[in-house]
Amino acid sequence: MEFFRWLQATQVVTAFRESGLAYPIVLTGHLAGMGLFGGMIAITDMRLLGWAMKGSSITDVVQQLRIWKQIGFVMVVGCGSWLLAAKAELYYYNPFYWTKMTLLLLVGVHALVFHRGVYGNTVELDRAPKIPAKAKIAAYISLFLWIGVVTCGRSIAYWDVPENLAPVYSSVPPSTTANAVSAERFAGPPLP
């Protein structure tokens, strides 16, 4: 928790969080990267399952989508790191954030387990008379994990931190004068 608090309180992260322009641009970049990265992974998995792009070899699909996956990955990780830093304490309490991180860890394990036999061996998959079961299992697991990552990622925004744990994000201390003016403005004209 102390690291999360320190991270979000750094000057550059505070300026980013309070920016009216930078934060929404980075959020948009994260979502666009997620669409690009996730979309390319989904196409690869659907090709492995024989559901899409049957006229193209698995090798062609994997090779042609690789650069787009890499661009999407850089966008997701780069922008996601800034978003995490901006509201780190808020994420610390969020169960959907931790579930997403756990699923991402499992994605890494999945990549290590299936890289040699499936994703790094597409020429052999193309030579096989039919797509091997291990490739289909890898694709099913991948789709399941990524759907979970995206679902948890979107759910992060809809979970409210309990009031007693909610962080206050502001580099400017609240002003009693400003609060009095705001209260007066919303109170309306005095009654006769």
Image (cartoon, helix red, strand yellow):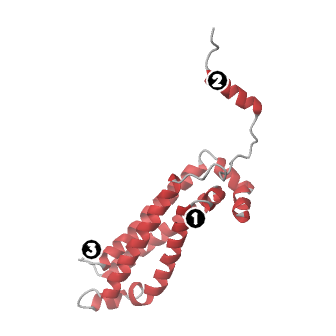
Pick the quarter of the image with the N terminus: bottom right
Element at badge 2?
A: helix
Rendering coords of residue 26 (x, y %)? 56, 55
Quarter of image, res 133: bottom left
- Which dot, 3 or 2, sits closer to the camera? 2
Q: Is residue 33 above or below residue 184?
A: below
- Residue 185 disc label: 2
- Is the residue under label 1 in contact with that under label 2 (CB below 8 Å)? no
Residue type at mark 3: give it: Met
Q: Do the residues labelled 3 and 2 touch (CB within 8 Å)?
A: no
Element marked by disc 1? helix
Q: In this view, does 119 lie above or below 19?
A: below
Image position, residue 112 (x, y; %): 49, 85
- Residue drawn 49% across and 72% down? 103
Q: Residue at x 35, y 75 (%)?
A: 45
Residue flagged by tag 1: what amino acid is it? Answer: Gly
In percent of width and height, residue 179 lies at: 71, 31
Q: How many marks?
A: 3
In this view, the residue in front, 6 or 47, is 6
In the image: residue 188, left or right of residue 134: right
Q: Residues within 10 Å of mark 3 (few under 14, many from 20)?
A: some
Between the residue at mark 3 and the residue at mark 2, the CA separation in whole angstroms equals: 61 Å
Quadrant into which the C terminus falls: top right
Disc 2 marks a residue whose amino acid type is: Arg
**Res 53 label:** 3
Quick check: 15 left or right of 72? right
Q: Earlier in the sequence, mark 1 or mark 3?
A: 3
Q: Residues within 10 Å of mark 1 (few under 14, many from 20)?
A: some
Camera-side mark, 2 or 1: 2
Outermost residue, top direction?
A: 192
Q: Mark 1 points at which residue?
A: 78
